[in-house]
Image: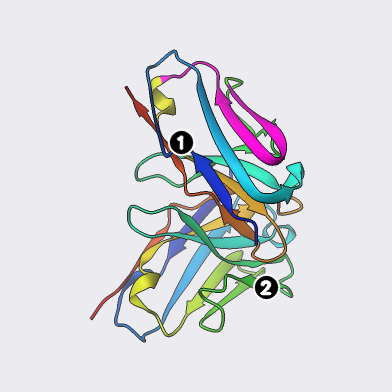
Amino acid sequence: EVQLLESGGGLVQPGGSLRLSCAASGFTFKNYAMSWVRQAPGKGLEWVSGIGGSGSVTYYADSVKGRFTISRDNSKNTLYLQMNSLRAEDRAIYHCAKGVAGATSLDSWGQGALVTVSS
Amino acid sequence: EVVLTQSPGTLSLSPGERATLSCRASQSVSSSALAWYQQKPGQAPRLLIYAASSRATGIPDRFSGSGSGTDFTLTISRLEPEDFAVYYCQHFANSPMYTFGQGTKLEIK
């Protein structure tokens, strides 16, 4: 059974930094692209960032480009999202999600980590 | 960037009825890149349909997807109480990697 467990969420001041982690199990982690998708309270889904299986290719939404960095450690089956220069509008639940082969959709999701940006 | 517009915003139906949810793309897209998700309150999204019409593992056959080009549809043939939720369509591309529609809330009438 695929399991994705996020950690590292919390309260941070505007301009601050936070690193999210996503521990994966139940599949061969290195073989699949992974993504972070966020959801602001009461709002819809917004894709944030994606990374290929080897970690050599990364993608970002314009809203986070230059501020967020996605990475992965395939030896630890763990996905990361380093978030810098956080803004109030970054407040959301951040889900990690596993891409299907070919990455055209996301077939497993974690429950998410809540990030709150407030002074 | 492809923009996905879902309609209606809210759909009020009773158990046993048929639900038809629409997703319209701002330009023609490949069917292989179109997916549907279900999200219940306090839960993560769940993949229902991929490649426009293929059911994901474990999804009941009352859920079906159809469409091509710019118009796609998710149909729930006979609503069960557990089907009342928010539904999102999603498109995959190189950049941005994924775009989502704004969602359709399916509520009990």
The picture quadrant where one finds residue B96 is bottom right
Q: Chain letter of disc 1?
A: B
**Residue at the location (67% across, 59% down)?**
A29
Q: Quadrant of the C terminus of chain A?
A: bottom left
Our reading of the magenta stretch's main secondary structure is strand
Direction from residue B48 to residue A5 in the image, left or right: left
Direction from residue B108 to residue B102 in the image, left or right: right
Q: Amino acid at mark 1?
A: Pro
Residue B100 among those drawn in magenta:
no
Q: What's the magenta region?
A: B63-80
* Badge number at residue A58: 2
Q: Is residue A4 above or below residue A56?
A: above
Q: Check disc 1 and report the residue beneath it.
A: B8
**Residue at the location (54% across, 47% down)?**
B5
Residue toward you, B91 or B1: B1
Check if mark 1's residue and mark 2's residue have beta carbons within 8 Å: no
**Residue at the location (49% across, 53% down)?**
A110
Q: Nearer the viewer, mark 1 or mark 2?
A: 1
Q: Quadrant of the N terminus of chain A?
A: top right
- Image coordinates of residue B27 in percent, x first then y, are 69, 51
Residue B69 among those drawn in magenta:
yes
Number of residues whose C-alpha sits closer than 10 Å to that of mark 2, classed few (under 14), some (14–19) or many (20 or more): some
